[in-house]
Image: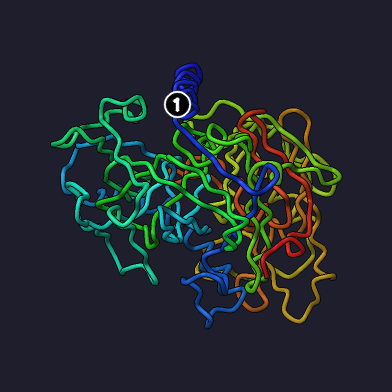
Amino acid sequence: MEATMSRVLLLFALLLAGQRGCTASGAGGFSMEFIHRDSARSPFHDPALSSHGRMLAAARRSLQAGAHYSRGAPPPAAPAPGDGAMTEVISRSFEYLMAVNVGTPPRQMLAIADTGSDLVWFNCRKGSGDGDLHTPSSDGPAPPLAAVFTPSSSSTYGLVSCQSNACQALSEASCDAVSNCQYQYSYGDGSRTIGLLSTETFSFGDGRAARRVRVSNVYFGCSTYSAGTFHSDGLVGLGGGAFSLVTQLGAATSFGSKFSYCLVPFYSANSSSTLNFGARAVVSEPGAATTPLVRSDVDSYYTVALESVAVGGWTVASNRSRIVVDSGTTLTFLDPALLRPLVSELERRITLPRAQSPEQLLELCYDVGGKPQGEWGIPDVTLRFGGGGTVTLRAENTFAVVQEGTLCLVVVPVSEGQPVSILGNVAQQNFHVGYDLDARSVTFAAADCTRSSAS
């Protein structure tokens, strides 16, 4: 599988190199907001929720995403079942958003940022000269402040032929009536998007035109139908496959195929995390730990080898397993062979009184009512990854207050509904995490992410 994917990536890179253009005012990179869906900067923000209410809602989403898929819920009906390419990826809820300016003149789209999938797509509207496009639809309530891209309003929009190499890189791609490339992309929870593979100019930056990075001829899905959990303007795939934004930026610019983020803690509702590309994505903080990417069942996933788990410096489990590093999943999911001894050792060391989990979502909870955080006595948990890199998780990475006075372990076992081990975003809070597709590695460094956030 890796050899096949390498050939596809090479073909795609050669194709991109032959037709791309890029203008950039920065020196080798750029940064932008990485907006948590529950933060004050998000249109999904609920001001009535406390910080622990936001945490509980995020934990609930993590568990429900897998439960939906395990129950065998049928995927939503599509206008043309079986047409186009289908790629099924991990079942998940979305947690982070990013703004992309699409087209000429630019139309700002606030999209799901997904490190576990590849395709970049936005909702499209039928307009004069747009061909056989249809008004998008979705299950559930309409997204707040939704934006829709109108191809006819942009002077740089282009369609892709179904005979092109790019279209052929989409498995089982199909042709519409006028030989444009159709796609169908499906996610593990049954959500899907259907549309036309297209090209457009994207621009990124801090809102000041002079400092924006513009990249032309980016491949994206002009979505004419979406169904499921996509309550947004679209989705930007940041995974490791051929059509992800990371791969396309690497082929079209001098930035390289790399990006990073620094996630602010959940309680920092008035701050946004930072998403970096190019030179700004280099993780150079003291103590940085690098681990190589390993073979994955899905090309999109950033999968590494987890060798062992230690509590307070004492190794409690050594059982090599693959784990996906993912910003789109809140909780951390571990193989029971690693989780059971971890929980046993935490129970032995933590002297707080036990408490019931809200909604019985989480296994290990404690009563911390009236006790300052400095007296909780939560030991550090150290993960040793392949290549010898070690990452030490503080209390804020392994436990969270999910209701007033109740502290719970936010590490849960993999299950039939969620069979993939995942290092979730709580475990990554206050870490600078860098992904380098050129070097095939992921790097972690402890950081104060509120200092680099967009406040």
Of 204 and 239, nearer the camera is 204
**Helix, strand, or loop for circle 1?**
helix
Q: Is residue 56 above or below residue 22?
A: below
**How far across and down, in percent of the image, does residue 183 sit?**
28, 38
Residue beneath disc 1: 12
State how many labels appear.
1
Q: Is residue 270 above or below residue 66?
A: below
For the question of whether residue 66 can be seen, the reply is: yes
**How far across and down, in percent of the image, does residue 220 sit?**
38, 43
Of 181 and 435, nearer the camera is 181
Quadrant, the C terminus: bottom right
> What residue sits 80% from the left and 53% below the top?
380
Alpha-carbon neighbours of circle 1 within 10 Å: few (<14), some, or many (≥20)?
Answer: many
Q: How is the image coloured?
A: rainbow
> What residue sits 68% from the left and 61% below the top?
399
- Left or right, residue 298 beside residue 178: right
Of 249 and 211, nearer the camera is 211
**How far across and down, in percent of the image, does residue 211 sit?**
63, 56
Three-letter amino acid code at the position of disc 1: Phe
Quarter of the image holding residue 243? top left
> What residue sits 60% from the left and 46% below the top?
24
**How far across and down, in percent of the image, does residue 312 sit?**
84, 49
Residue at the left extreme of this rendering: 177
Q: Is residue 133 above or below residue 271?
A: above
For the question of whether residue 227 can be seen, the reply is: no
Of 403 and 105, nearer the camera is 105
Quarter of the image holding residue 394? bottom right
Quarter of the image holding residue 340? top right
